[in-house]
Every structure is written in C-alpha cells, then in structure tokens.
Image (spheres, rainbow, N blue to C red):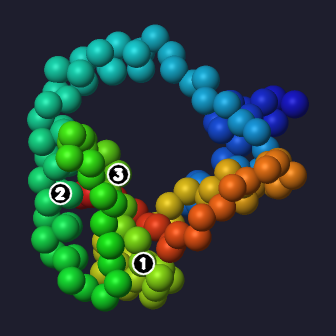
Amino acid sequence: MAKHAKHLTTTAKASPDEYYHDEVGYNYRLVNVLAAIGVGQMELLPSFIKRKRECVAFYKKELAGIGDIRFQKELPDVETNGWLFTIQTDKQKQLLDHLNANKILSRRFWMPMNKLPMYRDCVYVRKKTPQIIFIIPA
C-alpha cells in the first residue's frame, strides 16, 4: 500500500522518461525545506527567466527554416518565460534520434490526457495537430 500511495502522490507517472500516467495521480509533495528554498529562489527569478529567454531565442534562430519545424506561437500581448521550449514537426522520431545522438536532451511532449487509460472513456474533442517535442535548455 505504501508503494502505491507514493506512486499516486508522484502524479502516477509510470516512467521517469515519459510523461505517461497509468492512474489518476496527485502532486502533493512540498515540504517546509523546499518551500524555504523556493522563497529564496524567487529573488533569482528575473535572471532565470532572462536566461531561459536567451535559450529560446537561440533555438529559434538556429532551427528556423529547418525541415518542417514550427514554433509555438506567442500572442502579441504575451511574453513567454521560456519555461519549456517546444517545436512541432511531422518527423518526430527522426528529429529526436538526431538531437539526442548529438547530446541535445529532448523528448516527446507529455502524453495527452485522453490517451491515458483512466480517461479512455471520456468525451474528447479532437483537432489534428502534429507531434510536439521539447528541448531541455542547458
């Protein structure tokens, strides 16, 4: 029971490498020490965001015009914090293999909730979109 409880409190993620959840899970894992560290990190937040935006600008510059790669659109009145850099492509497997072979850590975007077993019987409105992957900034 303890093992299963821990699994549920870590979002029921079945694999450390894939965003695939095999049950409905929860994310209740913040303890006092981590909260204190988080408060301290807030002072550094502007510099973190600046660096993330620099990474996003670099990726967009270097990947622009390559194959069918498309970037997530940013609305005119919104400025991204660069938390997660995503691209869209119809050649996901080939691109992931190439990036990871060249030591650029990347993986598939998380599994859509309607693809998880616990939600398979729920109503889902679908619009076809290409596969999305993300690159983890250095």
Which mark is on residue 26? none
Near mark 1 (Cα within 10 A), the count class, few <14, some 14-19 or many ≥20, is some
Q: Amino acid at mark 1?
A: Thr
Spot occupied by residue 113 in the image (x, y as percentages of width and height):
67, 51
Q: Which residue is mark 1?
A: 89
Query: How far separated are the C-alphas under marks 1 and 3?
Result: 16 Å
Q: Are marks 1 and 3 in contact (CB under 8 Å)?
A: no
Left or right of 9? Residue 2 is right
Mark in front: 2 vs 1: 1
Q: State which quadrant residue 120 falls in.
A: bottom right
Q: Which residue is mark 3?
A: 84
Q: Which quadrant would the N terminus be assigned to in this image?
A: top right
Say what secondary structure mark 2 lies in. helix
Please, is residue 13 above or below residue 68 in the view? above
Please, is residue 93 above or below residue 1 in the view? below
Give whichever of discs 3 and 2 has the lower sequence position.
2
Image point (62%, 58%), residue name:
111
Q: Are marks 3 and 2 in contact (CB under 8 Å)?
A: no
Q: Are marks 2 and 1 in contact (CB under 8 Å)?
A: no
Q: Amino acid at mark 3?
A: Leu
